[in-house]
């Protein structure tokens, strides 16, 4: 279908002078509020007339199944419809036909456009709202859309659209993960009196990293501990959650135990190991100077790096030396545990003992297989900063479902931008089936 459309605009400009800014703002307002919406509505009306005429006359290549197997159509009436779009409110009147064979009353344009029965907004507007609300609070996001884009979307409406959207869905690859990354954070949830719960919520995030280095969101949970998360994952098909080789995490209680069925080895984050040791020593009553000394000792022990083989090949002697260093480092940590026990630092000694066997997993794995895995959880910490920026710093009073939904959207946008765009491109059906050409503006 090809049409040539002429826009009819009346301009009245003062002969005493006017500002360029006023001209730009008035032109923007004209086309933003009336011009683009009117243009889209006109195109839809032309398309509606063409496809309905073809169906009534039995012509045309578009022959959908709107009712029975042998339909014969005639015109019935018009229906008014409005759609909220990025270009403004689009108003159209589409034909409703009547099938003389089965008495059905189909609406051809709705089927032609692939619209749902009660759809009143476009998917491109839903995408814009989801992206804006994942970066700002609902109140500020609603104000931003209205002030900058002239798109009035109340925050309650935006919240409903986001909660009903399926844009946070992701597909976990069938191949095994090289390693998993897990972390959690707190947030201010909605307080409900009479439940016995405080307003502190807990948010847990699990990421998978493939052998190609691609980060894949595995899940985000609110109001569940790691034991419950592990049981939930176990109940799903096993091929959906392939077992990873290494789990990288901090020392959060219950984390490794809850996910024990989904990894072979654990790598404790070196940064958290030294940082959290100071807090545990403080709980044991150690002086500040002594805490600093023990933290520095542990940091020096953990300071071994995997040699960069692309610069200089690693020899057998080098590997033997690294293996001996790991053994000596574990012996030294055992010595530190003994010193802490003698001084009465029982909690700190237990803390070191629980993580001693998981501090050099990255080195042992590299020596055995040549595969490199991170020894710090910096990547998931970076991801959690993005989550915390939206969940903790921009809003409070979340419901468990709302916090989980927004976290999944932030995770997908931050870790899988291509997947986010691909999902929306499929939803919007962007297949180059529309071509518009601006031939220029002329004064009549």
Image (cartoon, rainbow, N blue to C red):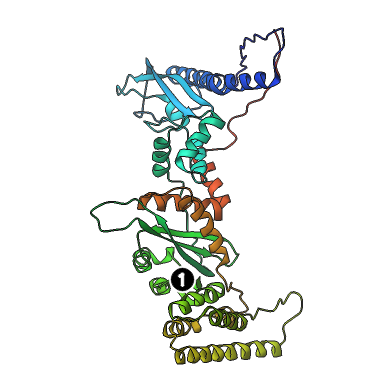
Q: Quadrant of residue 26?
A: top right
Q: Please state the horizontal and vertical placement of residue 9, each as a whole percent of the image.
A: 62, 12
Q: Position of residue 33 (x, y in %)?
A: 54, 22
User: Residue 258 in the image: x percent, y percent?
Assistant: 38, 71
Q: Which residue is mark 1?
A: 243
Looking at the image, residue 234 lies above or below residue 22: below
Q: Nearer the viewer, residue 222 or 288?
A: 288
Tell me if residue 52 can be seen: yes
Label count reads: 1
Q: Residues within 10 Å of mark 1 (few under 14, many from 20)?
A: some
**SS category of the residue bearing label 1:** loop
Farthest left residue?
194
Which of 414/173 is in front? 414
Q: Position of residue 400 (x, y in %)?
A: 36, 53
In this view, the residue in front, 71 or 158, is 158
Q: Please name the residue shown 47% across and 66% down the image.
A: 182
Is 351 situated left or right of 13 in this image?
left
Quadrant in the picture for the N terminus: top right
Residue reaching furthest right?
A: 312
Q: Is residue 168 above or below residue 250?
A: above
Residue 405 versus residue 152 in the image, above or below: below
Residue 169 in view here: no
Q: Please identify the quarter of the rendering in which residue 229 is found.
A: bottom left
Question: In the rendered image of this protein, does residue 308 appear above or below residue 125?
Answer: below
Q: Nearer the viewer, residue 177 or 48?
A: 177
For the C terminus, the quadrant is top right
Residue 126 placement, left or right of 314: left
């Amino acid at each position: 279908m090809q049409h040539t459309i002429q826009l009819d605009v009346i301009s009245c400009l003062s002969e005493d002078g006017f500002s360029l800014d006023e001209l730009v703002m008035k032109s923007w307002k004209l086309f933003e509020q009336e011009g683009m919406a009117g243009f889209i509505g006109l195109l839809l009306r032309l398309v509606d007339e063409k496809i309905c005429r073809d169906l009534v006359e039995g012509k045309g290549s578009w022959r959908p199944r709107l009712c029975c197997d042998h339909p014969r159509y005639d015109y019935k009436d018009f229906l008014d419809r409005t759609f909220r779009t990025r270009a403004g409110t689009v108003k159209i009147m589409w034909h409703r036909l009547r099938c003389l064979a089965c008495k059905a009353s189909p609406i051809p344009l709705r089927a032609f456009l692939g619209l749902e029965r009660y759809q009143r907004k476009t998917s491109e507007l839903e995408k814009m709202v989801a992206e804006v609300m994942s970066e700002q609070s609902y109140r500020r996001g609603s104000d931003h859309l209205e002030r900058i884009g002239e798109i009035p979307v109340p925050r309650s409406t935006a919240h409903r659209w986001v909660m009903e959207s399926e844009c946070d869905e992701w597909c976990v690859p069938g191949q095994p993960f090289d390693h998993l990354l897990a972390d959690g954070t707190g947030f201010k949830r909605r307080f409900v009196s009479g439940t016995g719960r405080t307003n502190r919520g807990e948010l847990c995030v699990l990421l998978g990293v493939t052998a190609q280095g691609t980060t894949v969101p595995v899940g985000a949970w609110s109001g569940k501990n790691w034991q419950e998360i592990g049981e939930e994952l176990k109940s799903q098909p096993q091929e959906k959650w392939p077992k990873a080789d290494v789990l990288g995490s901090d020392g959060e209680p219950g984390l490794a135990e809850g996910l024990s069925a989904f990894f072979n080895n654990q790598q404790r984050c070196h940064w958290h190991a030294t940082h959290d040791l100071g807090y545990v020593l403080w709980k044991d009553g150690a002086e500040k100077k002594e805490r600093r000394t023990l933290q520095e000792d542990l940091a020096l022990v953990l300071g071994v790096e995997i040699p960069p083989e692309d610069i200089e090949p690693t020899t057998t002697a080098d590997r033997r030396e690294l293996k001996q260093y790991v053994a000596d480092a574990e012996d030294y940590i055992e010595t530190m545990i003994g010193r802490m026990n003698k001084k009465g630092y029982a909690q700190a000694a237990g803390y070191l003992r629980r993580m001693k066997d998981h501090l050099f997993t990255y080195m042992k794995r590299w020596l055995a297989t040549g595969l490199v895995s991170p020894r710090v959880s910096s990547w998931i910490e970076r991801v959690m900063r993005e989550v915390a920026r939206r969940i903790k710093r921009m809003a409070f009073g979340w419901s468990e479902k709302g916090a989980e939904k927004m976290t999944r959207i932030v995770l997908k946008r931050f870790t899988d931008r291509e997947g986010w765009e691909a999902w929306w491109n499929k939803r919007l059906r962007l297949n180059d089936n529309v071509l518009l050409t601006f031939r220029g503006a002329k004064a009549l």
